[in-house]
Amino acid sequence: MAIDINPFENPYVSASDTVYPDTYFLEHRRAPGTFTSATSPAVRAFTDQGFTWGGTWAQPDLQHFQLPRQVP
């Protein structure tokens, strides 16, 4: 199970450093609604509940939170 939150302000960054959907994030990194650090309260609200955050990946996906897959 996964959720993407506010992709306009919390983008995916490709291996070539292309920011998707656009460069808004580069100009507004500290704007309200952005997830900029694994220790930020907004990110911790999810990670404290067992979600992993895509912002820590080699190719950051700042909008992405996911729960570990449950194997029945």
Image: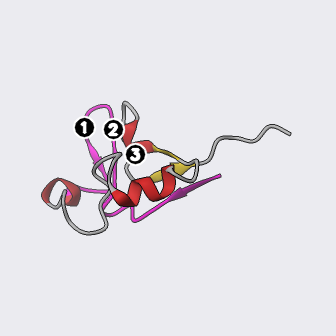
**Residue placed furthest toward the left:** 27
At x 16%, y 61%, the residue is 28
What type of secondary structure mainly makes up the magenta span? loop
Sequence-first tag of 1 and 3? 1
Helix, strand or loop for disc 3: loop
Measuring from the top left, give residue 62's x and y in whole percent.
37, 50
Which residue is painted at 36% across and 35% down in the image? 59
For residue 25, above or below residue 57: below
**Residue 1 vs residue 20, the one in the foreground:** 1
SS of the residue under disc 1: loop
Q: Are marks 1 and 2 in contact (CB under 8 Å)?
A: yes
Disc 1 marks which residue? 17
Which residue is disc 3 drawn over? 61
Q: Bin the neighbour count of mark 2 within 10 Å (Cα to Cα): few under 14, some 14-19, many 20 and up.
A: few
Q: Residue at x 26, y 42 (%)?
A: 18
Could you tell me the amino acid type at mark 3?
A: Asp
The image quadrant where one finds the C terminus is top right
Circle 1: residue type: Asp
Question: Disc 2 residue type?
Answer: Ser
Q: Which residues are magenta?
A: 1-23
Q: Examine the structure image and report whether residue 18 is included in the region drawn in magenta.
A: yes
Q: Nearer the viewer, mark 1 or mark 3?
A: 3
Locate residue 60 relative to residue 72 in the image: left or right: left
Of marks 2 and 3, which one's residue comes earlier in the chain? 2
Asked if the magenta segment contains residue 36, the reply would be no
- In the rendered image, residue 2, in percent from the top left (x then y), is placed at 59, 53
Q: Which residue is mark 2?
A: 14
How far is disc 2 from disc 3 in space, using C-alphas? 9 Å
Q: CA distance from mark 1 to mark 3?
A: 12 Å
Q: Position of residue 66 (x, y in %)?
A: 57, 48
